[in-house]
Amino acid sequence: MISDNKFLLNETVNNNWKRKRRNTYIIYNLLYFNTGFKLTLTVATSWMYVTTLLHTDQKQLYYALINLVAFTPSILCTSFIAKHFDKTRNIKFCLLVIYIIATLGGVMYTLPLAPILPVIGSFLSGFLLTLRPLMVAEIARSYPQNEAGVKLSFFTCSHGIGMAMGPVIAILFKNINFSIMGLPFTYGNIPGVLKTIQCLISVILIIIFVEDLSKEFDLKAETQIVDKDKKEEHFIFEIFYNFDITYLIATAFIASCFDDLLFVWFPVFIVETLNYSYDIVGLCYTIPCSLYIIMMFILLKFGGKIDFDKVGIACWVLAFSMGIILFVMNPQEVYKLEVALLLLLTCFLQMYAFGMLIFVTVSLTSFAQSKNQSFLDSFRCQSRQLGGLVGALIGSYSASHKNCIAYVLCSVSVIMLTTMIFRKKYLGRPNIHT
């Protein structure tokens, strides 16, 4: 690693590094776009996959498993991968290995020869979720602090754009029904083909464009005051015993729990309870995502500096509003009213999920030392994926328990909102020197 300011004084080297930084950042956004795309593509079609292609009497079980096991690799492995990356800074190698594993997962997800195959495919594809802390850390290390927040916000938006595109692409394939050598291809398992193609393209892009930026030069380490006497065990201790850090990690857990609960709950509720078509499922995912992403880009382009504290407060208000909407919804009401409420609910859900993700990510990355950057974000990521696993589990079996979800959503959001209002001035930069 080039570790002195002579790097910045060498104009040729500096410009070359900035060019590589730009190209690598673009690829990071494309990769995170792919992750969002795979998420909603799978969730929006997995119920049809299970009910039409898998020969099993345990359809609810396999629907839950497909959506649950995707979180397992991230929960179990993210901290280890992040710790290894913080020491080696070999992000190109990490990306290649994980995307090769995900490619195999896409192939297995496509095969409905046995109910366990799409479950295994979903598990292998779930390793993609372990990469986010690595890319977040590289962005934080490669840009000045006053630019990193905006870069991370755009990075998060790329995930949202992918989520918006997933159901749209799925709808385009809704009438596909053919076989190759006895293997059926329908709306249910075509996402496996698309995910495999995406992963193969991603591998090529990583090989050509991604660079180990912080291994060459760590901008954050050069500009940050470092406590050289800080020991690793003290760092871990402060993470778990500082109230504001704990609140941020708990926020990641709760936000993801609500987010994935509703995402998994939507298809079953819409198709089985409201008796609507799968087109409505895609519509409920796509339109709110698209509107939110447009609004976010306008905010980032013309709104100046984002007040991330206010973003967090607004997100908890949105969570409370979602609970109220769930109370109001009645499956016996007329078609247009229910569709309008579903669209409003999912619009709030997208704004809540991405706003909260941006708030927590920026709050944590702004104060962490460069040497622990991805390791710290891995705790947030694991907390988020654990929340997603819990939410997906509840959502898979709660299609007929709308009011229970509404009660929990309203009560938790009030508690978290009240806490955040009182601790707002500390949460933007928690009192910890990691």
Image (cartoon, grey):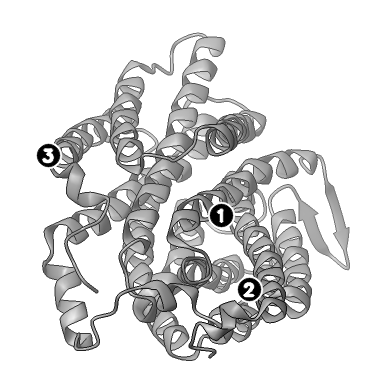
Q: Amino acid at mark 1?
A: Phe
At horizontal 32% and vertical 24% (from top left) the residue drawn is 321
Labelled pair 2, 3 in contact (Cβ < 8 Å): no
At horizontal 38% and vertical 61% (from top left) the residue drawn is 385
Q: Nearer the viewer, residue 171 or 141?
A: 141
Quadrant in the picture for residue 371: bottom left
The CA distance from mark 3 to mark 1 is 29 Å
Q: Looking at the picture, how far across and down is residue 291, in whole percent?
A: 59, 29
First in residue order: circle 2 vs circle 3 = 2
Local secondary structure at mark 3: helix
Question: Which residue is disc 2 drawn over?
Answer: 102
Question: Which residue is disc 1 drawn over?
Answer: 155
Label 2 Cα crowd, 10 Å radius (few <14 / some 14-19 / many 20+): many
Mark 1 against mark 2, which lies toward the viewer?
1
Q: Looking at the picture, how far across and down is residue 99, in whole percent?
A: 65, 75
Most extreme residue toward the front is 9
Local secondary structure at mark 2: helix
At horizontal 43% and vertical 71% (from top left) the residue drawn is 74
The CA distance from mark 1 to mark 2 is 21 Å
Label 3 Cα crowd, 10 Å radius (few <14 / some 14-19 / many 20+): few
Q: Amino acid at mark 2?
A: Ala
Above-or-below relation of 399 to 187: above
Q: Which mark is residue 422?
A: 3
